[in-house]
Structure formats: structure tokens, C-alpha cells
Image (cartoon, rainbow, N blue to C red):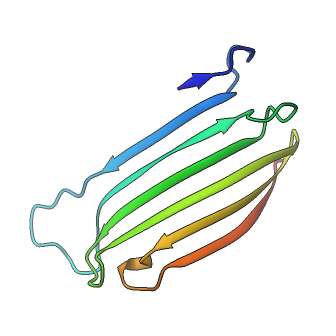
């Protein structure tokens, strides 16, 4: 969507967006406990901070139609920051808010972190 002007050609520094719609095509009766249509969208900004050109900040949301009773839908919101510690290692704190998990449970807040090491 947007590339930082000082970025090298082929660099991913800047703002990227993503979106997807996954419809449920049904040619008959909908099965209970099945998943219907889904939507996902969000953005990732890479190189936001000076001196941290390989770090990224992301925000995403997802919605799913469910056939389980309750609210019959699930919504999820996610925010993360991925710090590239070295060319082979990154640390990514993450926070997710899930509204009506599986369509029938209380809302959930999930906080975690991911350490990635590439061999």
C-alpha cells in the first residue's frame, strides 16, 4: 500500500494491508456446529521506528459466522509488535480480544509472546 521512500527496492518497509472474504457455499441444509462465511482484514507496518527497520506492528480483525447457537458469530481483534532481535531471531508480544468465542462463551482476552528462532 505504501513503501517508505528511502527503502531499497524489494524492501518491505512501509504499510501493507490484507483482506479476505471466504464465503460458505451451501447447496443444502446447513450442518449444526459448522462454520459459515468468514472475513479477515488488517494491516502491517514495517520499519515504523527509526533504527528498527525490520520490526513490524500489526493489527487485524476476523469475523466468522457459526452455526452453534448462542450469538452464532465470533469476532477477534489482534495487535502485535514483532521485534527483530537478530537476522535469525525475533520476539513478538501479542494481545488478542475474542468476542463470543465459538459463538457461545464469554469474551476472552489473550496476552502472549512468541520467540522465533530460524535455523
Task: Note whether 17 is above or below 29 in the view shown.
Answer: above
Q: Residue furthest right?
A: 86
Q: Residue 89's x, y, as percent?
A: 86, 48
For residue 89, side relative to residue 61 (left or right): right
Task: Note whether 49 is above or below 24 in the view shown.
Answer: above
Task: Note whether 60 is above or below 33 in the view shown.
Answer: above
Q: Quadrant of residue 33?
A: bottom left
Q: Quadrant of residue 6?
A: top right
Q: Residue at x 67, y 19 (%)?
A: 10
For residue 73, side relative to residue 116 (left or right): left
Q: Residue 48's x, y, as percent?
A: 73, 35
Q: Residue at x 62, y 56 (%)?
A: 79
Q: Residue at x 63, y 73 (%)?
A: 110
Q: Quadrant of residue 11?
A: top right
For residue 95, side relative to residue 18 (left or right): right
Q: Residue 78's x, y, as percent?
A: 57, 59
Q: Nearer the viewer, residue 36 or 100?
A: 100
Q: Residue furthest left?
A: 28
Q: Residue at x 37, y 85 (%)?
A: 104
Number of numbered discs on residues: 0
Q: Nearer the viewer, residue 1 or 27?
A: 1
Q: Residue 52's x, y, as percent?
A: 84, 36
Task: Note whether 92 is above or below 52 in the view shown.
Answer: below
For residue 57, side relative to residue 66 (left or right): right
Amino acid at each position: 500500500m505504501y513503501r517508505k521512500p528511502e527503502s531499497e527496492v524489494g524492501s518491505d518497509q512501509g504499510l501493507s494491508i490484507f483482506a479476505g472474504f471466504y464465503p460458505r457455499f451451501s447447496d443444502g441444509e446447513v450442518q449444526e456446529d459448522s462454520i459459515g462465511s468468514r472475513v479477515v482484514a488488517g494491516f502491517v507496518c514495517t520499519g515504523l521506528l527509526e533504527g528498527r527497520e525490520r520490526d513490524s506492528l500489526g493489527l487485524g480483525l476476523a469475523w466468522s459466522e457459526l452455526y452453534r447457537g448462542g450469538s452464532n458469530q465470533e469476532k477477534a481483534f489482534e495487535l502485535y509488535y514483532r521485534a527483530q532481535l537478530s537476522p535469525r531471531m525475533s520476539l513478538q508480544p501479542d494481545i488478542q480480544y475474542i468476542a463470543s468465542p465459538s459463538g457461545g462463551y464469554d469474551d476472552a482476552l489473550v496476552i502472549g509472546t512468541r520467540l522465533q528462532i530460524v535455523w
